[in-house]
Amino acid sequence: MIGAALYFVFAFVMIRLTSNGRDIAAVWVANAILVGLLASQARPKWLPVILSGFIANVVANLLTRDAVLSSLLYGGANMAEVLAAAWLLRAAVGETSVLGSLETFFRFILISFAAPMLSGIVGAVAAWWVFNQAFLLSWASWSVSDALGILVFTPFFLALFRGEYARCFAEKSGLQRLETLALLGLVVASAGILFFLAEQVPIFVLFVPTMLVTIRLGPLGTKAAVMLIAIVGLASTFVYPEAVAGDTANREQALILQIFLFVLLFSSLPVAADLTARGSVAAALGRRERELTQLATTDGLTGLMNRSAFIDLASRTFAGAQRQQICLVAIDVDHFKQINDTWGHHVGDDALRHLASVAGAHLRSGDALSRFGGDEFMLLLPGATVADAERVCTRLRENLRRAPLPLEEGGTLIVSVSCGIASTEQASTFVELSKHADAALYAAKSAGRGTHRRAIAAA
């Protein structure tokens, strides 16, 4: 119903402003509303939208042209155009933006011209039959005016009905919202000065605020800017035609406006599409770089840091520690080979993931846990004393006992670990520190496993 109401308003206004009641409207905006509405829906309600649009079109034509036959023919032709454009747009563009890439934009251009050129045949027949208008001129006018309306207004209404403008505005800060309004206000002010006050309209001058909007606000801003310029141009041409320089006739003014809008469209929208595509490529490369970095630094089984990443982090932490004490804990799963031999390697993998999950859940923000290789883990505790590290080891064993690993075959498995603790008081380099932690781990295993030992200074 909202779409039908908007359609009626725009259809009525465009016919009254840009047509003498017999010829074709110079710019046809109404179809863009329904095309955007249908293309934005996951499951378009084709029948109610088209039926309500047809009624709105017929009523608008009856009120402005007072001809029943032409109103019915115009209504049918417009709804056929809406159906074709919306269906082709959904097939060619899908969920992406019409300015998502240059390829997508050129598809949109073809659709914007193809649908009006086909529907224009019926519209031209109605104009020739009912109003005695020249067929070819009516067909050309219909094709150009409808294509212009779709090109200028469909991107805006499509984004509007998808909720893109609401989401974008909600995500912006107060300062960003102010900037958005200021830039769009600059576009309107520039268009108003050029259309209403300038004796001649230097088209290139409007490219400056439009490109500024494109760069700062992206494709959503460009769509809104082009639409606002079109509205100001329509107002100056048809509401206040005397504001346009010269004494040209209304149709000549309409032709000038159409040419201007086409030039603006084919200069600003491709730039916006190209910038959007480049931004998408840059974002994809950034994501890929982060993924590759994560793959290079992450253990694939547990999701923890791998050996090389941990050594790099620990070495940097050790080098920048100055007087801060650091503890390194070497952790090993007790009887890991027996787990694999008894329950299978998949249970062994589950045990390693379980240990990583339980140990990682109780770390401080500056602590670092790594799967060092096989069933051995390393835990870095910056700013921790040996007593602190011992409490960490005791808590880890208790948490593992309280949270046994469920087995697919039924029952549970308690994962037991042995720990070796070393501190920077006993080492001058990270390599020495790791050797002391390994020696302490060996001592814990020799003591019967399921316990921890601290490295001794003489080691």
Image: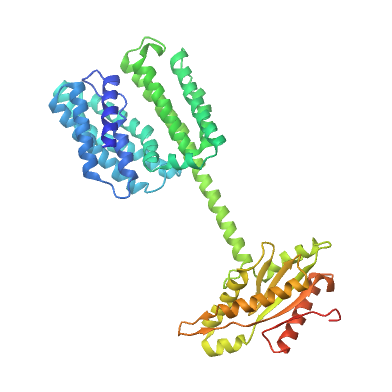
State the scheme by which the image is colored. Answer: rainbow
Residue 309 is situated, as x and y percent measured from the top left of the image, at 68, 66
Name which residue lies at 19% across and 23% down.
Answer: 63
Q: Can residue 335 be seen in the rendering of this structure?
A: yes
Q: Is residue 264 above or below residue 108?
A: above
Along the line of sight, the residue nearer the viewer: 233 or 127: 233
Image side of residue 171 versus residue 4, left or right = right
Q: Nearer the viewer, residue 453 or 250?
A: 453
Image location of residue 268, percent across then percent down: 47, 33
Q: In what quadrant of the picture does the C terminus appear?
A: bottom right
Give the farthest residue toward the right.
458
Figure quadrant of residue 39: top left
Residue 240 image offset from top left, x and y in percent: 37, 14
Left or right of 75? Residue 326 is: right
Residue drawn at (53%, 45%) of the image: 279
The image quadrant of residue 395 is bottom right
